[in-house]
Image (tube, grey):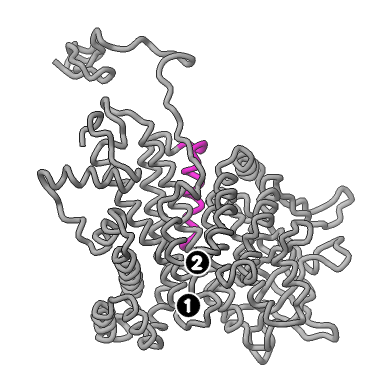
């Protein structure tokens, strides 16, 4: 007797007419009626609710880092955005942006070169939502947010990013441009546009660094800027320019003999009738981030203005990179969280072998582990945001570590979530393939994992005192001493050979310190204590007997925030 795959009752095997040696299982008399395209079983799709109120981590971040008075003002805005990002309206915008990809009309009907960039209604609609919700402006509104604007801003970024069709890319560069231009009164009007809450006034910015000679190694930049009576004339070729539809750009160019310098340049002429010395060579054909117009650009006598001093381009752009790396880290964890939300909602609706998928211990353990990892990554990313604007020298190190580590872990998590939904996870309509494709670029943007890990290795010796002070406050000085002692015992060759391991080990130490601090708070619960155990690496031990049964119950509480209905489960 064999088990009927339809009803899990027993059926009699019979010999296949095609091959006598092959036996197949046939449906028993308890089998269901034959289904058709219009009848039979239909899987109830997972439904996402408000992404702020249903998030298991944001409430904790708010209580840890945001004052009560600011929370009272911010929470209504968070709830509003939490509804918007799962609304039918934004779903249509995403679908439109993914279907109607940007393209270039290079010539008009008379053969004249016009390089008209055409973007979708969905893509343009994202700018409206971002502007109206202050995704850049909030970071600079210290009066409204009592000096906590960066935290408010990045909670909104976290909510918006997975539903933005990657419009957070130009927003991140806009934020970086606003930060550096705010220092110079000469750019007061430009700054006002970058942080405007009026969509008709708001500008977005590009950030043009990469050339055919390389991206991270900007020392070989071939673009040159020549001083003129009215500013600078810039000529060269930029190989990757994201957000080509932006209103301005910050770009690097050589200014012999001083070296690399940073420039501001509007994309269009003062009349607005044409590009400011820019020719679109072609748009990139990318794995993901498809609605985002990324181009190769030829610059011919582009009019620009110097930002800072000649020869200080790398130093000036570094402050922009700190901000964009923070955006990258938050975008990483938010994309992973959205994928997890879909997978956990699907598991609550799917039935397999007579049991809800979310009550099968193996599947539940996977969802629980990913959720605990996400809690740690969320702590790291948002703690890094605290350094923005503080003048703390740890910003550069934390931003590099958080960006590199969160991006790599996000790729793993989104892939697992896609698999956790089975064949449906592979379908475009679930959003999981889009989230997976888009996650791949996060480990490349703003410095690859190897580049950032090498930067971490270079930076650690300069910040030993500051790292000890930070670890002392978090109660992990001994662990930091052990880590830095191992680092100190390595020669330069070993350090750069093991740069990734060094960077990731530091990331895990920082996360461990943050979840430890959280678990020691008076209001800590099961989730916080389990998160501490997870990041302490206690969970990989194989549990048996009653331990395993207790583990499954705890996993359910971690995933769904409540105890399971045990009478209906196998836990």
Where in the figure is residue 222, as x and y percent of width and height?
64, 78
Secondary structure of the residue carrying tag 1 is helix
Q: Are marks 2 and 1 in contact (CB under 8 Å)?
A: no
Residue 519 position within the rendered picture, expressed as x and y whole percent measured from the top left: 30, 63
User: Relative to 38, is 261 on the left or the right?
Assistant: right
Q: Is residue 506 above or below residue 486?
A: above
Q: Is residue 396 left or right of residue 2?
A: right
Asked if 354 appears above or below 140 in the picture, the reply is above
Q: For the magenta stretch, what is the residue range?
A: 427-444
* The magenta stretch spans residue 439: yes
Circle 1 is placed at which residue position? 395
Choose the circle earlier in sequence order: 2 or 1. 2
Residue at 25% x, 86% y is 489
- Classify 10 Å Cα crowding around label 2: few (below 14), some (14-19), many (20 and above): few
Answer whether residue 150 is visible to the viewer in this image: yes
Prevalent SS, magenta region:
helix
Q: From the viewer's perspective, is 204 left or right of 546?
A: right
Q: Residue at x 41, y 38 (%)?
A: 345
Circle 2 is placed at which residue position? Answer: 67
Residue 210 placement (x, y as % from top left): 59, 70
Q: Nearer the viewer, residue 392 or 435?
A: 392
């Amino acid at each position: 007797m064999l088990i009927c795959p339809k009803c899990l009752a027993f059926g009699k095997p019979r010999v296949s007419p095609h091959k006598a040696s092959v036996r197949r299982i046939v449906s028993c008399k308890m089998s269901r009626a034959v289904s058709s395209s219009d009848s039979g079983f239909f899987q109830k799709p997972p439904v996402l609710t408000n992404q702020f109120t249903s998030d298991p981590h944001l409430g904790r971040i708010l209580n840890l880092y945001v004052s009560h008075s600011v929370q009272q003002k911010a929470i209504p805005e968070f709830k509003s955005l939490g509804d918007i990002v799962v609304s039918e309206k934004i779903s249509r915008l995403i679908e439109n942006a993914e279907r109607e990809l940007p393209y270039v009309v290079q010539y008009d009907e008379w053969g004249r070169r016009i390089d008209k960039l055409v973007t979708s209604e969905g893509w343009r609609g994202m700018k409206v939502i971002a502007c109206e919700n202050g995704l850049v402006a909030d970071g600079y509104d210290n009066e409204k947010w009592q000096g906590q604007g960066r935290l408010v801003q990045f909670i909104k970024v976290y909510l918006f990013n997975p539903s933005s069709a990657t419009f957070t890319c130009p927003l991140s560069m806009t934020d970086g441009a606003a930060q550096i231009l705010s220092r110079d009164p000469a750019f007061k009007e430009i700054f006002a546009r970058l942080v405007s809450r009026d969509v008709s006034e708001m500008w977005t910015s590009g950030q043009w660094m990469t050339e055919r000679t390389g991206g991270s190694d900007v020392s070989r930049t071939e673009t040159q800027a020549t001083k003129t009576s009215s500013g600078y004339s810039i000529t060269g070729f930029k190989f990757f320019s994201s957000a080509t539809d932006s209103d301005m750009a910050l770009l690097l160019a050589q200014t012999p003999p001083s070296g690399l310098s940073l420039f501001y340049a509007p994309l269009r002429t003062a009349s607005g009738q044409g590009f400011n010395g820019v020719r679109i060579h072609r748009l990139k054909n990318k794995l993901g981030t498809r609605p985002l117009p990324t181009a190769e650009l030829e610059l011919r006598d582009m009019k620009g203005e110097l930002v800072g001093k000649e020869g200080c381009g790398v130093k000036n752009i570094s402050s922009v990179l700190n901000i964009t790396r923070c955006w990258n880290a938050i975008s990483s964890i938010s994309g992973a969280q959205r994928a997890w939300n879909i997978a956990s909602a699907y598991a609550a609706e799917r039935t397999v072998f007579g049991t809800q998928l979310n009550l099968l211990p193996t599947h539940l353990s996977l969802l629980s582990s990913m959720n605990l990892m996400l809690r740690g990554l969320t702590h790291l990313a948002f703690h890094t945001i605290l350094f923005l604007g503080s003048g703390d020298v740890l910003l550069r190190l934390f931003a590099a570590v958080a960006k590199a580590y969160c991006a790599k872990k996000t790729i793993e998590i989104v892939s697992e979530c896609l698999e956790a939904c089975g064949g449906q996870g592979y379908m475009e309509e679930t959003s999981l393939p889009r989230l997976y494709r888009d996650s791949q670029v996060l480990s490349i943007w703003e410095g690859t994992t190897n580049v950032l890990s090498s930067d971490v290795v270079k930076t650690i010796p300069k910040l030993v005192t500051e790292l000890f002070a930070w670890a002392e406050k978090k109660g992990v000085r001994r662990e930091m001493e052990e880590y830095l002692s191992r680092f100190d015992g390595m020669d330069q060759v070993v350090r750069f050979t093991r740069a990734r391991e060094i960077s990731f080990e530091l990331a895990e130490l920082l996360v461990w310190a943050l979840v430890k601090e959280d678990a020691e708070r008076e209001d800590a619960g099961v989730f916080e204590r389990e998160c501490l155990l997870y990041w302490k690496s206690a969970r990989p031990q194989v549990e048996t007997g009653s331990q395993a049964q207790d583990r499954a119950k705890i996993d359910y509480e971690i995933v769904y925030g409540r105890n399971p209905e045990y009478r209906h489960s196998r836990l």
